[in-house]
Amino acid sequence: MTDTIHIFTDGGSRGNPGPGASAFVATRDHSLRPSKRNILYKRAELRGRCTNNEAEYGAVIMALVWAHSRGHDKLVIHSDSQLIVRQIRGEYRVKAPTLRPLYERVMGLLRGVIWKAVQHPREHPWISLCDEMVNEILDARRR
């Protein structure tokens, strides 16, 4: 495929560690005025007990598995997690033993893909949408 797909991700846990969830939105649009009609796919999942960083990695993995299954090979990964973005770009080492297998899974899924990773403030509209999805699924779990 030739179109660049933008993947916006977020993950979080209530407590650190605590019940966690991950979410992503895939789109061809990366504007600051997102339109739901431009969403190719979106998904949120409970993670079980995890840290915030594990939930963030879970969102990236979930998105990359989806992109791989659809044959998308040009991706821009957008996240509000400085740690995740800088680790996958190779700017930070992966020190936490719990993050190492998640990092390795991400890097394996990125093999053969043209990609870049970009960090945004959590107020970015697409990141905010992912955050809402994370909170909705965590709130529904409590009910």
Image: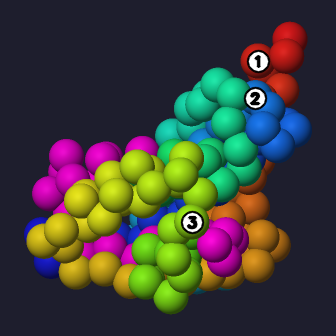
> Which element is circle 1 on?
helix
> Which element is circle 2 on?
strand
* Residue 76, visible in the rendered structure: yes
> Which element is circle 3 on?
loop
The residue to which callout 1 is attached is 141
Q: Earlier in the sequence, mark 2 or mark 3?
A: 2
Label 1, label 2: how far apart the Cα atoms are: 9 Å
The residue to which callout 2 is attached is 19
In this rendering, the answer to whether 45 lies above or below 42 is above
Residue 34 location, x and y as percent? 62, 69
Q: Earlier in the sequence, mark 1 or mark 2?
A: 2
Report the magenta residues as a range.
62-83
Tell me the kind of residue under disc 3.
Answer: Lys
In this rendering, the answer to whether 16 lies above or below 128 is above
In this rendering, the answer to whether 78 lies above or below 31 is above
Image quarter where the N terminus lies is: bottom left
Label 1–label 2 contact, CB within 8 A: yes
Residue at left offset 71%, top offset 44%: 51
Residue 15 location, x and y as percent? 87, 38
Residue 95's disc number: 3
Please tell me in which quadrant of the rendered image residue 45 appears. top right
